[in-house]
């Protein structure tokens, strides 16, 4: 299970069911009057906020067979916020079990509203390598942000797959 623990720590920056803890008054993309009623613009504006992890459902498999929940070390999944800003900037912050900030990264993101996909690109602070992750938006409005992320890793002949669904609510 050490492998699952290490895998979860690498994957953890991809997850969040979020709770918005910022004001909606100062967020949004600049738009022309013709774009004000545009659904895509509305989705972009709803995303631009600070979202805090509230809950998640995690599923993991090894070679296609489910890994029992008691064999997955989820202690590494701690508090987390995703802050989507105007201009495609995303700040991901993790917190330790005491609520203190333990790490933060700034990356870029693109939200493809037609495909309900957010792709963000960051640099791994341990290795210096650039990577891209995809979040599949399941539901988004100014109060709720729910999405999924899935990652696969090969270890010799074994293939590990972790999928996390995250659920959020706004915090006023």
Image (cartoon, rainbow, N blue to C red):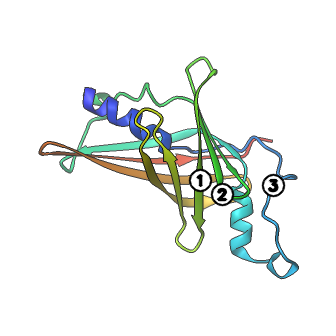
Image coordinates for residue 46, horizontal then vertical, percent: 72, 59
Judge from the rendering whether residue 57 lies leftward or rightward of residue 155; answer left or right. right
Regarding mark 3 in the picture, which secondary structure is present there? loop
Picture residue at 36% right of the left edge, 49% below the top: 151
The mark that comes first in sequence, 1 or 2, is 2
Q: Which residue is mark 2?
A: 88
Residue 156: quarter of image: top left
Judge from the rendering whether residue 171 lies leftward or rightward of residue 144; answer left or right. right
Q: Which residue is mark 3?
A: 27
The mark that comes first in sequence, 3 or 1, is 3
CB within 8 Å, label 3 to label 1:
no
**Image mark for residue 10:** none
Location of residue 154 with respect to 119 vertically, above or below: above
Q: Which residue is mark 1?
A: 108
Location of residue 33 with respect to 86 vertically, above or below: below
Q: Nearer the viewer, residue 137 or 29?
A: 29
Q: CA distance from mark 1 to mark 2?
A: 5 Å
* Label 3 crowd bin: few (<14), some (14–19), many (20+), radius 10 Å: some
* Label 2 crowd bin: few (<14), some (14–19), many (20+), radius 10 Å: few
CB within 8 Å, label 1 to label 2:
yes
């Amino acid at each position: 299970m050490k492998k699952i623990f290490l895998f979860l720590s690498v994957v953890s920056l991809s997850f969040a069911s979020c709770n918005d803890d910022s004001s909606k008054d100062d967020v949004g993309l600049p738009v022309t009057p013709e774009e004000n009623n545009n659904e895509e613009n509305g989705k972009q504006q709803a995303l631009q906020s600070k979202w805090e992890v509230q809950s998640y459902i995690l599923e993991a498999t090894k070679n296609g067979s489910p890994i029992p929940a008691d064999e997955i070390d989820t202690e590494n999944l701690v508090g987390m916020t995703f802050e989507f800003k105007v201009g495609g900037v995303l700040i991901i912050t993790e917190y330790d079990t005491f609520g203190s900030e333990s790490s933060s990264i700034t990356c870029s993101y693109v939200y493809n509203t037609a495909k309900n996909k957010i792709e963000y690109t960051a640099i791994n602070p341990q290795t210096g390598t650039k990577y891209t992750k995809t979040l599949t938006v399941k539901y988004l409005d100014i109060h709720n942000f729910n999405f999924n992320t899935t990652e696969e890793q090969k270890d010799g002949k074994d293939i590990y797959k972790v999928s996390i669904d995250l659920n959020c609510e706004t915090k006023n």
